Amino acid sequence: MYLPNKSNNIKMHRHGQVVKENVFEDGVVPLRWVAVAAVVTSLSLVVAALVDRRLPEPLDRSAPADHFIAEIAHEHLVNLTSIGPRVAGSYENEVLAVQILVEAVKSIAAQASPHNRVDYDVFSASGAFSLTFLDGMSNVYRDVQSVAVRARAAGGRSPRARTALLLNCHFDTVPDSPGASDDGAGCAVALETLRALVAAPRPLRHDVIVLLNGAEENILQASHAFVTQHPWAKSVRAFINIEACGAGGREVLFQAGPHDPWIMEVYAGAVPHPFASSLAQELFESGLIPADTDFRIFRDYGDLSGVDLAWSSNGYVYHTRLDTASRVPPAALQRTGDNVLALTLGLLSNERLELATERERQPVFFDVVGAFVIAARAPAAALAVVVTLATLALSLHLSADDAARQLYMSRRAWWRVVLRAARGVALAQLAGVAAALLPALLMHAAGARLAFYASPGLLVPLYALPALCGAWADARYAWRASAPVRGWWEWRAWRDALALWAGVVLTAGALVGLRSAFLPLLWTLPALAALPRCSPAAGAALHAALSALPALQSAYLALGSVDMFVPIMGRAGTAPLPADVMMSLVVSSLTLTTFSWMLPLVAAARRPAPLIYAGALVSALTVALVLLTPLGAAYSAERPQRVMLFHTRRTLHAPEPVVEDFYWLPELDVNTPHSLDAHVGGMREARASSADECARWLYCGAPYFLPVLSLVSRGHRLPAPGPPLAELRVRAELLPHESPDARTLSLELEGPSHVVVILSPAAGAQVPWCSELEGAPQPGPRWGARLTYFIALHHARRPRPWRLRCTVRRAEGAGRAGGAWLQVSAAGHAMFGAGQRHERHARLLAALPASVAATGWGVDLHLLEL
């Protein structure tokens, strides 16, 4: 055990004072240093918030014609959203929206300079494709409609010889939402970008195609129709997709690639207001965010590379009635428009747009607090990792050498001290996470769930403060019980331990190919404080200065992550972990990362207990207020609870038809259905799908519209006084097949524009072919020992009967065993028009309070066993 400064050796100071050499020092860092460091680090969140809310001044019509003018874009947005909801297949979407968009395109063409031309094509197409979206599905569509616009230089090469850049948005919406941000604003930005491009007094070097697609919410159908069938698609070389999962604020570049790293390099050098992160892309691709965009279609079915942009602020309004034009400020349109126009010009002027695809991995990219973007290709990123690790190794070696000289211990002994401190760092972080879990578990058990949803500021006292208090208490007292060194050497050991952890995480991230490893790379910067030999206080100041950038960048990323994840908790479904627990894990991890540089100060602090006790007290009082006062209200008019209520007629064809009418309420968050007890009559009598029902019928016999069984595994049934207006006529039979181990399912369906068919063959059987897909459907989640197949059928115009033929094949010889071959669930969803809701259903939804964002429609569901 090494306790320096504990001997009684006497040394004469140069000023004649007698001092003790190696005197034991306990708590060398004044508490005020720790408090100031905590306040300054907390202010990094304020800086990040100010950056996030900084928007440019919107331009009006007095601006030059070749600039993006937010006033014009906002007019497009108002015109489009004034129609109301625009569900694919509805009159509003297929006629009114198309008329407004065509008129806007004609106006843009009239304003084009003599050097440029604008053509447009209103086209419809039919097709089919499979997606691994959520649980996996097969998508079949007929007559989906889009408006494609092509801008080109006057004269020049023939269309076949030209290359083009694609700008994509969608104008359709989910039911009951005006869809201002998702994605009317995207189309407004695309149209205004097009106007600025063609109004410029110079010819376009390459063509620009703007796809205003009319069936994205059906799950990506119109983009598939364009990229696989439209003749203009063959000239597209790259794309920009404009999307949203929130309203207003800054748009984030959250996907890039999969190839052509030069596209990100152009973004880094061109856009005036950057906001991009490899971390965001890896989070999105991990499946933690239950969404997808047309980016996937262009990537997978068009073999194209591009970027995905989306507004993410204020995700509470996403897919609700609150998504209105008033929530998309002109300043947000200006910011996104400036970026899209600059990126478009940068890509159009780049010669690589004409060259073959660069089959290289996307670069590591991230913006530094909104100021500029770093984009490093794989070789440069690998070199940066090697240089960083070499510098880190040098700094740790010099620190060990310094300890060996001053503490009269071997370098190996000092490394043992550092490794022990590294264990202390890990235990302190775990203690912080565990401390944040306590209030989350308590509030969940007491029923105060999702209190942070309506008041995100509660995340600080509920989870961030306990995390810091738990980590600091462990670092100060658990370590101190058996600390091998004390005083400033204690601070040094923890500093070196943090550097060691940063190196380990950086190495692991680089080895598995994580581009988000840029964050631990930044956290190696404080290790440079060991390079110069200076006094302990000066070393601590240098360490703090070098920690400023990684702490600020971590706070910046943390704020963006929390802004995104909090609204998602309102539609997280039946997640394996309660939403409060999930957010405590997210917030505590982000907080501990941002404040991690302070652990050496806390470990060597002088009596830090008052600071720790104060934080714990504030947290405890907040928990008490949440549990005992209206502060714990989970929802508000601005941050409402999401509710979906499907008026369902269910017919069980086994063997005699049994018909039931009910409202089906999927469990979208942890408070469903209890939060609706006071507002919906009969809610207390609602019953969840029973285990017997789920074992008997696939998808628990419920009218799922999307393949989200793994996300929303439970629902509740309320009695309904009568049937919905929706009606689906179903005729199903099994026909002989040329093989004794196979049968042909013949399924005829006639009803609403949107129909969902779910097939589940008997155990050991599969569906290798369906006629509308011209191949095998996409497998979904297993139902016990059985496969399931989720098939979405959509008519955009003039619904006609569906005639589906599918082959059901058992393992060889199993077909002679008898018994049912498969189960079929067929549901007709009336998502728009006069048949969308019965009057009683409409009254029920209208009676819900402002703190509820409700939607729903009529469904005619048939369950068959053949």
Image: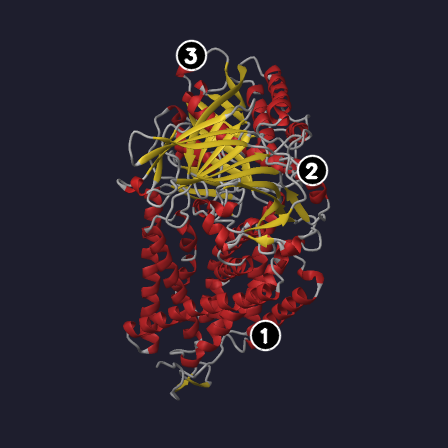
Figure quadrant of residue 787: top left
Mark 2 vs mark 3, foreground winner is 2
Q: Quick one: 114 or 847, which is closer to the camera?
A: 847
Figure quadrant of residue 313: top right
Mark 1 vs mark 2, foreground winner is 2
Give left or right: position of 26 versus 717.
left
Name the element at disc 1: helix
**What percent of the width, then of the height, locates residue 715?**
56, 50
- Provide the residue designation for mark 2: 326
- Provide the residue designation for mark 3: 158
Residue visible at 56% across and 22% down in the picture: 798
Label 3 crowding class (10 Å Cα cut-off): few <14, some 14-19, many 20+? few
Q: Quick one: 769 or 166, which is closer to the camera?
A: 769
The kind of residue tagged 1 is Tyr
Q: CA distance from mark 2 to mark 3?
A: 44 Å
Disc 2 to disc 3: CB gap under 8 Å: no
Q: CA distance from mark 1 to mark 2?
A: 45 Å
Question: Going from the N terminus, do you reach mark 2 or mark 3 first?
Answer: 3
Identify the disc placed on residue 73: none
Name the element at disc 3: loop
Q: From what the image shows, is residue 470 above or below residue 781?
A: below
Residue visible at 52% across and 33% down in the picture: 755
Residue visible at 32% across and 35% down in the picture: 742
Image quarter where the N terminus lies is bottom left
- Provide the residue designation for mark 1: 613
Disc 1 to disc 2: CB gap under 8 Å: no
